[in-house]
Image (spheres, rainbow, N blue to C red):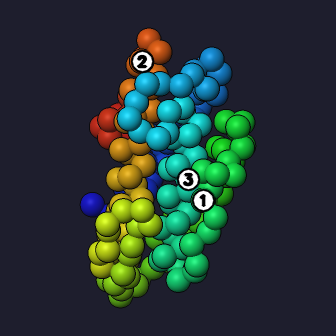
Amino acid sequence: MELISIAGYSTKAQQSLFEFVIARPETWTVPIATISRYKTLPEQLAHCLGAEQRWMARVQGRPQPERYESTAPDDVERIQDDWRRRRAITTAAIESTTTADRERLIECTLPGWEFVEVLSVEEIFFHIFNHESYHRAQCSMMLQAQSVDPPNFDYVFYKR
């Protein structure tokens, strides 16, 4: 499957989550008992955006930015606006890369984790969307813990 298709699905699913939460402000700041460090919906969503920003810095050969999670606004609409801007940058990067660009290897480390790995740019792009899906599932569980039925993020419904 083409990366741009994966990006399109992930973008649509994440947009659906934002719209769903905006329509239900009572769900926004309810902390959930979890072993995750991200205990509320804004913390989860800010982490997704921050991680995408950090992975794209690697792809673009820039220094790691300040963690978005530590400076993220509390307002869902502002996080959504920041996420839209970030996603536009990521999507434009995917659209402008050549096969050779996507095969370029980057040594990646994750501070605080024993992770050192060489990944291709294509693998990093895939990871951005897979990581977002992982945390979107956590958001779904957070909503379910509040007795709220989350949106359906299945790919087959996106294709309709």
Q: What residue is shown at x 53% (from left), y 25% (from top)?
A: 31
- Indicate which disc residue 87 carries: none
Q: Is mark 3 on a helix, strand or loop?
A: helix
Mark 3 touches mark 2? (CB < 8 Å)? no
Q: Is residue 1 left or right of residue 158?
A: left
On the image, numbered disc 1 is attached to which residue? 67
- Residue at the image position 36 percent from the left and 44 percent from the top: 134
Residue where numbered disc 2 is placed: 145
Secondary element at image label 2 = helix
Query: In the rendered structure, are the residues bearing label 1 and label 2 in contact, judged by CB atoms less than 8 Å apart?
Result: no
Circle nearer the N terminus (3, 2): 3
Q: Residues within 10 Å of mark 1 (few under 14, many from 20)?
A: some
Q: What residue type is labelled 3?
A: Leu
Of labels 3 and 1, earlier in sequence is 3
Of tags 1 and 2, the one toward the viewer is 1
Left or right of 75, for residue 26: left
Mark 1 or mark 2, earlier in chain: 1
Residue 56, x across and y down, in percent: 51, 70
* Residue closest to the eye, 29 or 33: 33
- Along the line of sight, which residue is nearer the eye, 77 or 40? 40
Location of the N terminus by quadrant is bottom left
Q: Mark 3 points at which residue?
A: 49
Left or right side of 109 for 22:
right
The answer to whether residue 159 of the structure is visible from this angle is no
Can residue 147 be seen here? The reply is yes
Residue 113 x %, y %? 36, 62
User: In the rendering, at what x and y percent does residue 54 appear?
Assistant: 52, 66
- Measuring 50% from the left and 60% from the top, which residue is drawn there? 52
Name the residue: 39% across, 73% down.
109
The C terminus, quarter of image:
top left
Question: Can you tell which quarter of the image residue 18 is in?
Answer: top right
Q: Is residue 46 above or below residue 113?
A: above
